[in-house]
Image (cartoon, rainbow, N blue to C red):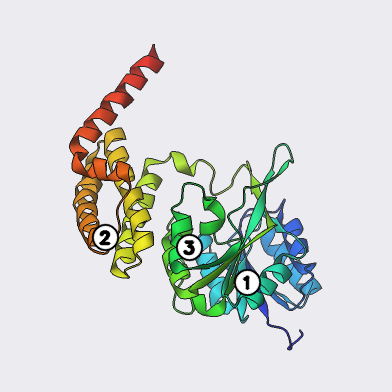
Amino acid sequence: MNNELPLVSIIVPVYKVEKYLNQCVESIINQTYQNLEIILIDDGSPDNCGQLIDDWAKRDERIVALHQKNGGLSAARNTGLDNCHGEWLAFVDSDDYVAKDYIEKMLKAAMRDHTNLVISHYYEVDEISGEQINIKHNPAKVYNIDEFWKLYYSPEKNFVPLVVAWDKLYAREIFEERRYAVGLVHEDEEIIFDIVKNARRISIISNSLYYYRVNRSGSIMAGIHASDKMNQVILEIKKTRTLKLMHDEIWIGAIGATDDLIIDAINSKALFNDAKAREFYSEVIPMAKKNQRILSKHGYKLGEKQRVYLAIPGLICFLKRVKNNFKKIYIAR
């Protein structure tokens, strides 16, 4: 390895991706930036992936093959973080692949902008049709923490590249005292607050450098958004993040987070009206009203719609429930 260039560790969790793994690894070893440490973690995969990563490690001295019992995506990423040595880190999902200049362009942006987190854009690769779709870009610029959260909660943003673990280059210190929550779906959303806080300055570049596979059968994300349980998980993550933004006095982010949480709490109660939805609503509405008072003292206002919702939350829930029931009756007819 060239000691004059910073070492970049690329962490690849591997599980049930025998069909896609070679394309993924080939895209990494053929990077224009060569000073890489490539960590392949076999997360107890029941197919031939374990043997494949051992074979790759024999072919390229930059590759480290690790094996562990199945612990899920977060556990595999954490194993990579615990065993990497690079000044910079990147994650690649093992059913995806990257452009040949993926690392080079992001590292150049970090050096140019004096930032320690770089976010690129991506293509969606449809597994069925083979079509590659260049996804809408967020504005390319250097963001401080306030500017990032303003973008994050903006209705015009492309949310996915802002929150996922892949499509990013991280300075090592971002993960110095932080790991992914094991066993938690939406782990990327759970950790994003600390990543942004630790990064402080963030480059978003306009290049689409990552190829994200969609419509793949067996994917961990397949059908996840239809689950009521998963919906409850993301609501709790959003509530915790809102509290953190308020605590750290990141007012721009706190406005967006509180606005978002008010809508979620009312919609959840109107749609499900079960014990968990009612409990979440009863926690969030008083919290949001408190946030509103604090934000107002600092010269910030919640959105107009959210202010109306907070003024008459019970009536809004009732009206939404009536509307939902009417839709069900209309569809049934």
Disc 3 versus disc 1: nearer the observer: 3
Residue 49's label in the rendered image is: none
Q: Is residue 219 left or right of residue 225?
A: right
Which residue appears farthest toward the front when viewing the image? 299
Label 3 neighbour load within 10 Å: few <14, some 14-19, many 20+:
many
Give the quadrant of the C terminus.
Answer: top left
Q: Earlier in the sequence, mark 1 or mark 2?
A: 1
Out of 154 and 323, give the one closest to the viewer: 154
Q: Which residue is mark 1?
A: 66
Q: Is residue 278 left or right of residue 67?
A: left
Please name the amino acid that badge 3 sits on: Phe
Label 2 neighbour load within 10 Å: few <14, some 14-19, many 20+:
some
SS at mark 1 in the image:
strand
Taking the spot 61% from the left edge, 82% from the top edge, the residue there is 85
Residue 148's label in the rendered image is: 3
Which residue appears farthest toward the top when viewing the image? 333
- 268 over 58 or under it: above or below: above
Please name the amino acid that badge 2 sits on: Leu
Pinpoint residue 100: horizontal percent, then vertical percent. 78, 63
Please name the amino acid that badge 1 sits on: Leu
Pinpoint residue 194: horizontal percent, then vertical percent. 43, 69
Taking the spot 41% from the left edge, 41% from the top edge, the residue there is 227
SS at mark 2 in the image:
helix
Q: Which residue is mark 2?
A: 295
Pinpoint residue 114: horizontal percent, then vertical percent. 59, 78
SS at mark 3 in the image:
helix
- 136 over 48 or under it: above or below: above
Taking the spot 55% from the left edge, 62% from the top edge, the residue there is 165
- Res. 113 image quadrant: bottom right
Give the quadrant of the N terminus.
Answer: bottom right
